[in-house]
Amino acid sequence: MVKFVLASASPARLKLLKMVGINSIVHSSNYDESLINLTDTEALVNTLAQKKAETVAEKFPCALVLGCDSVLEVEGEIYGKPDNPQIAVSRWQKMRGKIGKLYTGHALIDTNNNEKIILCGITEVHFANIDDGSIESYVNTGEPLKCAGSFALEGKGGLFIDKIVGCHSNVIGLSLPLLRTMLADLNYKVSDFW
């Protein structure tokens, strides 16, 4: 029986997998993201997802290992997780009223058959034009400090998103339709992991 391993400590990704019935082993990669310095957003998230998955795949000889990485791009700037509340406030002041693109790289490695698939999901995010007080109140909750792009769609941050164009689960950190496609490409069904 092939195990499903999530190479991420993200509670949001794990919650998405549980929500659709995929039982997974969580094994964070602890990959040092500062080792990758790319300016192309899609190449960045795909490379980071691949490195995270590869780091964990070495430890699981008969498994499917999923690595993911998400960043937000607004007007050509790439935003990962903010380092501190001041950065989160500054980002929100730049993002409000604008449209961003949330990129999530997905790397799925089948260690049993030595195959891998890497795909990127891209979702358009329309940010509400919120005032400084709302931004500061939101940042003070601490939620934006844990998330790429300084917001969590599935949390309080969802109140400040006017519209999503594309896959909503991609914005949370894992595109479920993309995962289904990747599993099929590796000759698995989602139900194999129920």
Image (tube, rainbow, N blue to C red):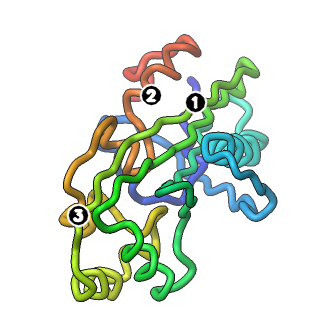
x 23%, y 64%: residue: 128
x 53%, y 69%: residue: 81
- What is the secondary structure assignment of the residue under circle 3? loop
Say what amino acid the circle numbered 3 marks.
Answer: Ala
Which numbered marker is on residue 28?
Answer: none
- What is the secondary structure assignment of the residue under circle 2? helix
Which numbered marker is on residue 119?
Answer: 1
Instruction: Give the side of residue 58 with respect to residue 152, left or right.
Output: right
Please tell me how crowded label 1 is: few (under 14), some (14-19), or many (20+) other residues with Cα within 10 Å: many
Say what amino acid the circle numbered 1 marks.
Answer: Leu
Give the mark, 1 or 2, whose residue is nearer the N terminus: 1
Which of the 4 quarters of the picture holds residue 17?
Answer: top left
Q: Nearer the viewer, residue 31 or 40?
A: 40
Q: Quadrant of the C terminus?
A: top left
Q: Are marks 2 and 3 in contact (CB under 8 Å)?
A: no
Closer to the observer: label 3 or label 1?
Answer: 3
Read off the residue under disc 2: 178
Q: Are marks 1 and 2 in contact (CB under 8 Å)?
A: yes
> Could you tell me residue 152's position as x and y percent?
34, 63
> Could you tell me residue 96's position as x and y percent?
31, 68
Give the mark, 2 or 3, whose residue is nearer the N terminus: 3
Q: Quadrant of the N terminus?
A: top right
Which numbered marker is on residue 128?
Answer: 3
Say what amino acid the circle numbered 2 marks.
Answer: Leu
Mark pair 1, 2: CA separation? 8 Å
